[in-house]
């Protein structure tokens, strides 16, 4: 469940919508808590989904500490990625503001950071770095991905490929 002092707003053309603070949110405040209405899907379930549903998973889900894709039932699914995010998870089912968030400022999360526990280190760096590099090559830095189904299919194949994690 998303913090009550937030709302959905249009950010800009490339990103689309995001969550912004409507009141001051001090550092250390819980900004999101997982609840029973949030839906979790195993990777095998996602792979069996029709393309339309995989698009939704790719766009709105995050990966939890168990490796499941979580679709938030409320507006929390609109929290966008930022490397220098305003909120972070400690690996549990809640997020905290890691700095003061002012009214009108977007709440963001570093989605890649949350995936680190699922990747092993290699001689060429972490497999996360490999996956991030490959993802960047697949879609570039443009957040307006036009063929998300193609992206998800290629990313899933990449993550299951033995070459991805080879030293």
Image (cartoon, rainbow, N blue to C red):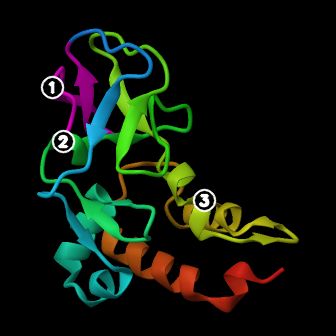
Q: Is residue 104 magenta?
A: no
User: Which quarter of the picture shows residue 46?
Assistant: bottom left
Q: Nearer the viewer, mark 3 or mark 2?
A: 2
First of labels 3, 1 by sequence position: 1
Marks 2 and 1 close (CB-CB < 8 Å): no
Q: For this view, does 129 lie left or right of residue 55? A: right
Q: Are marks 3 and 1 in contact (CB under 8 Å)?
A: no
Residue at horizontal 28 percent and vertical 38 percent from the top: 32
Report which residue position mark 1 lands on: 4
Residue 18 relative to residue 36: left or right: right
Q: Which residue is pictured at 55% across the width and 31% down the height? A: 84
In which image quadrant can residue 12 be found? Answer: top left
For mark 2, what is the residue?
Answer: 1
Q: CA distance from mark 3 to mark 2?
A: 24 Å
The spot of residue 28 in percent (x, y) is 43, 22
Which residue, given by chain and number where applicable, does mark 3 sit on?
Answer: 116
Decide: is 5 above or below 117.
above
Label 1: how many Cα within 10 Å (few below 14, some 14–19, many 20+): few
Q: CA distance from mark 2 to mark 1?
A: 9 Å
Label 2 CA crowd tier, 10 Å (few <14, some 14–19, many 20+): some
Q: Secondary structure at mark 2?
A: loop
Q: Which residues are magenta?
A: 1-22
Q: Residue 147: tell me if it is visible.
A: no
Is residue 3 covered in magenta? yes
């Amino acid at each position: 469940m998303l913090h009550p002092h937030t709302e959905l707003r249009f950010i800009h053309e490339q990103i689309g919508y995001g969550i912004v603070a409507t009141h001051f949110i001090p550092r250390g405040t819980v900004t999101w808590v997982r609840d029973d209405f949030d839906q979790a899907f195993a990777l095998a379930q996602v792979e069996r989904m029709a393309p339309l549903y995989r698009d939704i998973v790719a766009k709105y889900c995050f990966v939890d500490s168990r490796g499941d894709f979580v679709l938030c039932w409320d507006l929390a699914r609109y929290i966008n990625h930022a490397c220098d995010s305003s909120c972070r998870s400690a690996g549990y089912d809640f997020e905290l503001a890691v700095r003061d968030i002012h009214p009108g400022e977007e709440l963001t999360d570093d989605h890649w950071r949350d995936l680190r526990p699922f990747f092993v280190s290699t001689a060429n760096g972490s497999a996360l770095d490999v996956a991030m590099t490959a993802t960047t090559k697949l879609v570039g830095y443009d957040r307006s991905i036009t063929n998300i189904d193609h992206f998800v299919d290629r990313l899933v194949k990449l993550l299951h490929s033995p070459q991805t994690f080879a030293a």
